Image (cartoon, rainbow, N blue to C red):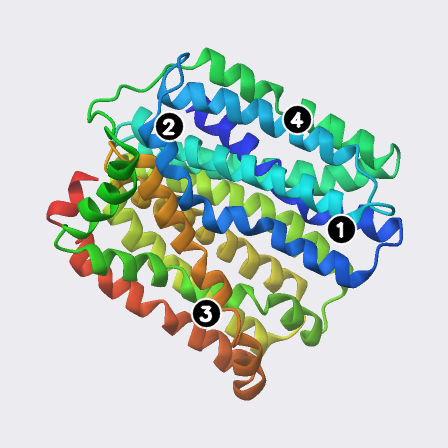
Amino acid sequence: MLVSLLMGFACGLPLLLTVTVLQAWMTEVGVDLSVIGLMALVGLPYTLKFLWAPIFDRYCPPFLGRRRGWLLIVQVCLMAAIALLGMTDPAAHPWWVAAAALLVTFFSASQDILVDAYRREDLSDVELGLGSSLYVNGYRLGMLLASGGGLILADHISFPGVYLLMAALLLPAVATTLACREPPMAAGRPRTLAEAVIAPLSEYFQRRDALWILAFILLYKIGDSMASAMTIPFYLELGFSKTEIGAVVKLFGFWATIGGSLVGGLMMLRLGIARSLWIFGVLQALSTGGFAVLARIGPSAPWLAGVIGFENLSGGMGTAAYVAYMASITHKKFTATQYALLSSLMGVPRVMAAAPTGFLAERLGWAPFFIACMLAALPGMLLLVRIAPWSGHGNRW
């Protein structure tokens, strides 16, 4: 469990170093806004990581084993890439900055692949729920330290100094890799690279419910994603100050999400993953409806705190169960490739469902919009009847 937490922190830390912190640095030195906008493309490796995941399933380094050996290589390269990014000059050579940032995202996405595979192979099905929740919490803490901590530090030391410090903060992850155990290869590993590419897909699509599971992954959190895309305009239009939004939504909400993930992980030890998906999914949908209530009440700080607390708590619980479920359905022979594919698919609704939300909110009004988001959760919940019934084969989770 401690390994899950520490590895989650290591995976979350690099993410915003190529987004929030880099944008602040480039803005400060006067880089053109069009160039800053194009920097978003360096995040593509997070979406395309399934393309090189088979390499990590097929090949085994000559030291530490298949998962720890690759992890050590990738983590050392990631630290070097972050340090290299800090040594670039955004004002004089923005495209060299882009190249260094692309290296950071490539090795960061590779670390994600390996940590996800390690967690699946090291933890039993019963432990996956709590392990996944601790991983998610570690990930969020890493993101918070990199973005919030990085920007605060940049007021006191140079941006190159910030990046060097962030690279050094990955040393505990390297120590964790060296100290933890290598999970057993009970299912073996692919014998050829072709098998590592093709077999994970063929094995998955031979399952009876393969397409239903993909539909579930796309739809389970779609209502939550739709609502989240419009919350900041909603708070401002309702009459909340930016201070109230920062204090209640961002700070209080962050810790509520952390608490929700931890509570969800502990509950999964008793309930199992399948029943947790049901309970947490219902709570997620109801919490989205809370925004419709807030739209009727108006700018009340206590109500805002209550709605945010409930929404982030249930959202954290739902995410923990969602991540644990995806890990539980991967085949241990192809863990890296199958989980990379599923987690890439998991990101699709965040983009596609968010796109029409402004139009819907404008046409419907705030309260009906959030009710529509709540109802959007129903298809995902209905799919649970088939892929993870309350009683039946789903209870093995």
Q: Nearer the viewer, residue 242 or 12?
A: 12
Q: Secondary structure at mark 1?
A: helix
Three-letter amino acid code of the residue under disc 2: Tyr
Q: Are marks 1 and 3 in contact (CB under 8 Å)?
A: no
Q: Nearer the viewer, mark 2 or mark 4?
A: 4
In the rendered image of this protein, does residue 282 appear above or below residue 121? Answer: below
Three-letter amino acid code of the residue under disc 4: Ala
Instruction: Please report the residue visible at 82 percent of the width from the left and 36 percent of the height from the top.
Output: 159
Q: Nearer the viewer, residue 102 or 354?
A: 102
Q: Give the Cα distance between marks 4 and 3.
A: 46 Å
Three-letter amino acid code of the residue under disc 1: Gln
Q: Nearer the viewer, mark 4 or mark 3?
A: 4
202 on left or right of 360: left
The residue that label 2 is drawn on is 118
Instruction: Please report the residue visible at 42 percent of the width from the left and 51 percent of the height from the top.
Output: 344
Which label belongs to residue 80?
A: 4
The residue that label 3 is drawn on is 289
360 on left or right of 53: right
The residue that label 1 is drawn on is 23
Q: Earlier in the sequence, mark 1 or mark 3?
A: 1
Instruction: Please report the residue visible at 36 percent of the width from the left and 48 percent of the height from the top.
Output: 341
Residue 113 screen position, x and y as percent: 43, 36
